[in-house]
Amino acid sequence: MWWKVLLSAWLVSVALSGANAQGADPVGWWRLDGQTGAVDVTGNGNDGVAVGAQLARGPYGDPEGAFEFSGTATSYIAIPNNGALDVRYSFTILAHIYPTGDAGSIFNYVGDNNVHGVHFWQTTPQELFMGTAGRYGGLPDPVTADVLQQNAWNYVGGTFDSPTGEAKLWHNGIMVGSLLISVFEVATQFPVRVAVNADDGRFFRGCIACIQLYNYALTQEQILAARDRCFPGAPVGLWPLNSLYGATDVTGNGNDGLPVGTGFAPGPSGDPTGAFQFSGTIDSYIDIPNNGKLDVRYYYTILAQIYPTGDAGPIFNYVGDNNDFAVHLWQTSPQQLFMRTVRRDGTWPDPVSADVLQQNAWNYVGGTYDSSTGEARLWYNGQLVGSLFIDVAEVASQYPVRVAVKADDPRYFQGRIACIQLYDYAMTQEQIEAARDVGWCQVKPEEEVPPLLPLPTPTPTPTPTPTPTPTPTTTPETTTPPNWDITLIILVDGSSSVGRDAFQLAKAYISHLIECLGYINVGLVYCKCEPNTSISLGEYDNIPDLTTAVEEVEFYPSTTRVGHCIHYTQCTTYWQDDVPSVILVFSDGQIFGSYGWGYYDDVAFFVQKAMNAGITIYAATIGRSFFWDWWGLLVITGGDDSRVVDTTKEDPSWLITIITIENCGVCIQLIKVIEIKRPYPWEEDTEPNEGECSFEPRILQQACKVFTTPGCLQDLMMNFAGFWDSIGDIWADVEERTGSFIDDVENGVEALINGAQDAINAAGEVVRDGVQNIVDNVRSTVSSCRISALDILSQLAPFVNTVRQNIQDIICNIISDAKERLIDAISEFFEGLVKDVFDVFCDFLDGLIDALQALLDAISFILPQSLEDFLNNLLAKARLLLWLKRIARLFGEGIGWLLCRLFWWLIRPFVPPFIYPAPFRPLIPFIPPIIG
């Protein structure tokens, strides 16, 4: 039992050491900047030695705020370990990285020949990796996450908590991966190397800043707080407004903006998606919440890059009570920059303004206020252009913010805005100049690296390399968007509950869907704990390359954060004006909250934000059906069950048809439904249909939309001529059966009459006369019945053509079961027509039957048995005439089965359909029949 005592004591000591260390300073901290270089600023003495590394621009624009590594074996930092870096049980590693290469170490304990050290790496262009090696040679599974952004600053971290055994990865303050591992003591007794690991050909290329090491596992709040430890005076709000980050507040303070009616446009550095475009209308703006972090109260600096093309409008506007003014920075005329520092009590001091703006050009503008001096200042391209002493003790900054539009004011900003920054202090000129090139806002081509400072010689502006003309292919797809085009982003759930096999099936379904769409304006976002864009809009110029790229997306199981993924998709996609915007989410519905919110709340919140921005969202099932959460899928669509798609029951060609018809109002995709059909055995337990013909009301409503869209029915009739001719075949069969039945009735009655003539003649005179009258009436009635029936057939023929030409109206009247409701609708029409034609006849026939029955009852005692049998048979034949109305149902059943077969073939994945019941089996062709 002695080992239990020792183990318990060890666990207690570890827990106590972790508890005592909460909030403690790092045990190693290397700022990697121009002031301290690679010195360990904790004072613990583990100063790094930089080899082949140079100073570069840091995350917040400091010209010497990071070290750049060349991606070679001779570019690294070597850090000794005097014991202070031996965290042994629990740890946190944090760093800011700007990767421009494929792989390399970020922070690597250099083990010996037999023991690996703890290592924190970039292992692919997107993959963050941490191996928590055991102290005595154990190497458990690593924790990984595909979250890194190339050519951009990433705040990354790895933690391990020995008492719980949980290793975690962090990206921009969000946990993106976790794993339980069996490690008591970690291998941290070795020295450390940054960017290079001996005997490994992978070398980190890019920039690294602010490496921190702690001897305990930090919480999310602590990791967020440590983000700017190396950067005193970091912004309280920073919105890059580019394709990498959208309107996200990259400070981690949580005040992410919601763009409405905006698009991406070229930015200050020339990147084609480096800014947001505003149309200068009331419905083009960004809403930014304020959770308190943006309440600067006493001091502030507002900075932005603007490209004005209109007369006036807000740049950064705190929205006061009742839409009143609070602190605001505006363009108030084509040239005038304007700032008013409204007091917290709502009173207005004088504004400060300057006529400095250049139209149709980039302007770096700013406003500062310092309550200790009472001075408000305006800045333009880093120069002071206006100042005023206003003596405001506390400013009105407790409100949310709106960019480009202020309610109840007709002045709307028109042009582009990029890189909005807010600080809770008044910056100096030097700081404002340095913040102009803040790293989060610099979106660069992949081949470009951050500029090194100091530069040995001035570097001329590079001439843009012209994009080569793609080699023409034989693929018929066009790269010119047709007027019915949509912007479609496919978002694929990469959660563990989906599974690798289902993920592969989803990719096959998506590839077929893209082929059916027939256009390349499709993007794909891989939704993990931290989403990433796997395929950008317009990245490929032909369908085969695009579908190949879909197939090459790798599955890395992670936590589901669908709400965050939808928000990421909304903010990072270039949604074109006047083009329908659609997000198609493939998910199992197992959606979990982000940022510690509730189970569904964050998804509903972000879905609503996307819908408010004009985006339509569909949800399609993925994974094994017993994992599906239909409520979660419904939440993804904003509560619209008509946009929840069961991919085991609906073909991808039908799905894209519905999407294009609902969002574009055109029928162009329907022919592709006919032309492109492929099997999709989604589940091993999928069974063929056993004869039932039923569809959900939602699918029937979709069918109604398809058949009533201009051109759709004509396309179907043109390509399924044999199918529509089958309606005529069914009618011919019904017509033949009806005529045969009438002949049988007439012949049968005549035969009975002739066969009973002797019995009638032998009867008494009274009886003979009565029966003879009955016989005459029967002959007359049967003759009238035949004439009327043939008249019905002639009147029904035009109706058959009407059914063929207006079948969409019949379909649209179906609200539940397809076949039964269709049969009822047609039968009702037929029976109404029969009743109208036979109205008098039916009344007479009923009276005749009653008279015959009364006669039989009255004279049965004197009638010969043969005559009684004759009259009974005659009565039965007369009653049978009423069956004539059932021809309507016969025809309706034939039409119903035919349309059901068409629905089945169009909508279902390729599963063997039902078999037609007799007598229609030989009449209805297989779907699809011969075209033409």
Image (tube, rainbow, N blue to C red):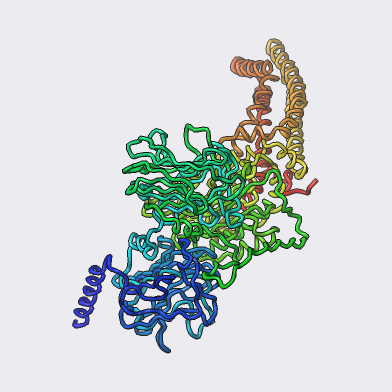
Q: Is 20 positioned to the left or the right of 354 in the image?
A: left
* Rendered residue at 22%/75% (across/down): 13
Question: Closest to the observer: 54 or 718?
Answer: 54
* Rendered residue at 33%/79% (across/down): 45
* Rendered residue at 69%/52% (across/down): 518
The image shows residue 418 at horizontal and vertical percentages of 53, 51
Question: Closest to the observer: 61 or 784?
Answer: 61
Q: Quadrant of residue 679?
A: bottom right
* The C terminus sits in image quarter: top right
Q: How many marks?
A: 0
Q: Is 21 positioned to the left or the right of 541 in the image?
A: left
**Residue 862 visible at all:** no
Question: Closest to the observer: 94 or 17?
Answer: 94
Q: Is residue 38 above or below residue 916?
A: below
The image shows residue 55 at horizontal and vertical percentages of 49, 71
Question: Quick one: which residue is furthest to the top in this view?
Answer: 766
The image shows residue 487 at horizontal and vertical percentages of 62, 49
Q: Is residue 86 above or below residue 807?
A: below
Question: Quick one: which residue is furthest to the bottom in this view?
Answer: 113
**Residue 208 visible at all:** yes
Q: Quadrant of residue 450?
A: bottom right
The image shows residue 530 at horizontal and vertical percentages of 47, 60
